[in-house]
């Protein structure tokens, strides 16, 4: 009886604390800035179309909203835009004209490597950053995006995340790349990777079954009361083989290895921060990139394959690409009040501002195809 009494007292204290926390959380959420959440999974958009939409929203959103955008994208196959894909030289076109090769996704490739796209920063020089002969011979699509940063290779396993911030809504975020990256870890990705990692840790909570008064906590007589783990169990749950997610120089890393490429663009009233996280990648596709002259100190002279790490090696066995996006959304929801927006809403902006996404691409969009 004494034990049951103490247990009821503990449960009552937890319930009071939970109600207090809930009220505090609700009050805090009322002060959160609003963010339009655009999930492009399942839309079939290409990498070029994704970049075109991002810049459109950064520069021409009539409501000047903050945005969070996630998605998986086709490397080369456009759904909306119409522009010529490589190869561009006549000899290679003739050589590949009769090829009937089909990739693992069912795309007729004509012998061209359509499994990836190389994306340069706005100031990137192809002759210094790309193995030109290999990329040209394989007919790899090369884009120059509107933002700064380095060169990345994206494919069907690249996890795209983008945040657009407005200076008036996020005055505490200084519009400089390093400050924006630090904010992204504190406001979104730190929480996202922490919750994603907890998904794999065993739950060792104790279940106590008892008869009698339920303290208003369980459903009734004979049901289970779930207690929090003991300190020893908590420490055990926290132990994991997954390296710590952190910001290293200007990179997101697990331990000593990079997990994605990121870049920023700064405009008068705001900024954009976008990242392609490496859930998986094809080793051979990374060979299109040269070792850049400018690289972080912690990289040293490591090759791309030694420097990069796949997220699926640490999270893939019991999780998925989609789970990553859900944890990013959960992390974002802790810092913003989210409003769901559809692709059609965005295409309406393109239509009203420029006559359509194709017209935006053909005229003002700074993302362009690079012909090797």
Image (cartoon, rainbow, N blue to C red):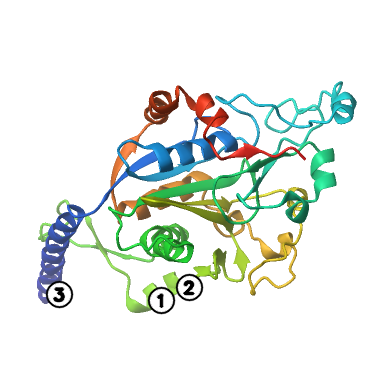
| Depth check, front residue: 234 or 331 | 331
Measured in 3D between alpha carbons, the distance from the residue under mark 1 to the one under mark 3, in whole angstroms, is 26 Å
Classify the position of the N terminus by image quarter: bottom left
Q: Which residue is mark 1?
A: 235
Q: Quadrant of residue 97?
A: top right
**Res 165 label:** none
> Which of marks 3 and 1 precedes in the sequence?
3
> Which of marks 3 and 2 precedes in the sequence?
3
In this image, 186 relative to 297: left or right? left
Q: Which residue is mark 2?
A: 239
Q: Which residue is mark 3?
A: 3
Tag 2 near tag 1, CB within 8 Å: yes
| Depth check, front residue: 11 or 307 | 307
Residue depicted at x 40% and y 28%: 353
> Few, some or many C-alpha atoms within 10 Å of disc 2 (few <14, some 14-19, many ≥20)?
few
Classify the position of the C terminus by image quarter: top right
Q: Quadrant of residue 64?
A: top left
In this image, 99 relative to 2: left or right? right
**Percent position (x, y) of residue 91?**
89, 29
**Which one is in front in this view, the residue at disc 2 or the one at disc 3?**
2
């Amino acid at each position: 009886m004494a034990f049951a009494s103490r247990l009821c007292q503990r449960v009552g204290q937890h319930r009071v604390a939970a109600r207090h926390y809930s009220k505090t959380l609700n009050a805090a959420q009322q002060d959160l800035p609003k963010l339009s959440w655009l999930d492009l999974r399942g839309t079939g958009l290409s990498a070029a179309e994704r970049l075109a939409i991002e810049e459109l929203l950064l520069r021409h959103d009539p409501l000047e909203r903050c945005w969070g955008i996630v998605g998986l994208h086709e490397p080369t196959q456009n759904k909306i835009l119409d522009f010529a894909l490589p190869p561009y030289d006549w000899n290679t076109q003739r050589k590949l004209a009769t090829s009937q090769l089909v990739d693992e996704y069912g795309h007729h490739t004509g012998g061209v490597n359509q499994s990836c796209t190389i994306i340069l920063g706005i100031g990137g020089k192809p002759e210094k950053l790309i193995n030109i002969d290999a990329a040209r011979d394989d007919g790899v699509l090369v884009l120059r995006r509107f933002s700064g940063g380095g060169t990345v290779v994206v494919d069907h396993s690249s996890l795209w995340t983008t945040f657009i911030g407005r200076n008036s809504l996020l005055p505490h975020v200084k519009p400089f790349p390093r400050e924006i990256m630090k904010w992204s870890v504190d406001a979104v990705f730190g929480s996202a990777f922490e919750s994603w990692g907890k998904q794999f840790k065993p739950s060792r909570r104790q279940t106590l079954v008892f008869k009698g008064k339920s303290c208003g906590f369980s459903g009734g007589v004979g049901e289970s009361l779930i207690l929090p783990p003991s300190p020893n169990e908590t420490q055990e749950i926290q132990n994991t083989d997954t390296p710590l997610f952190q910001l290293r120089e200007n990179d997101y890393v697990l331990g000593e290895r990079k997990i994605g490429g990121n870049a920023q663009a700064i405009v008068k009233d705001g900024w954009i921060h976008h990242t392609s996280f490496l859930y998986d990648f094809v080793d051979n596709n990374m060979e299109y990139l040269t070792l850049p002259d400018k690289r972080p100190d912690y990289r040293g002279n490591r090759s791309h394959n030694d420097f990069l790490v796949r997220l699926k090696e640490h999270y893939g066995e019991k999780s998925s690409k989609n789970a990553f996006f859900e944890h990013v959304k959960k992390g974002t929801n802790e810092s913003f009040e989210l409003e769901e927006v559809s692709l059609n809403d965005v295409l309406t902006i393109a239509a009203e501002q420029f006559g359509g996404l194709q017209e935006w691409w053909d005229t003002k969009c700074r993302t362009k195809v690079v012909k090797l």
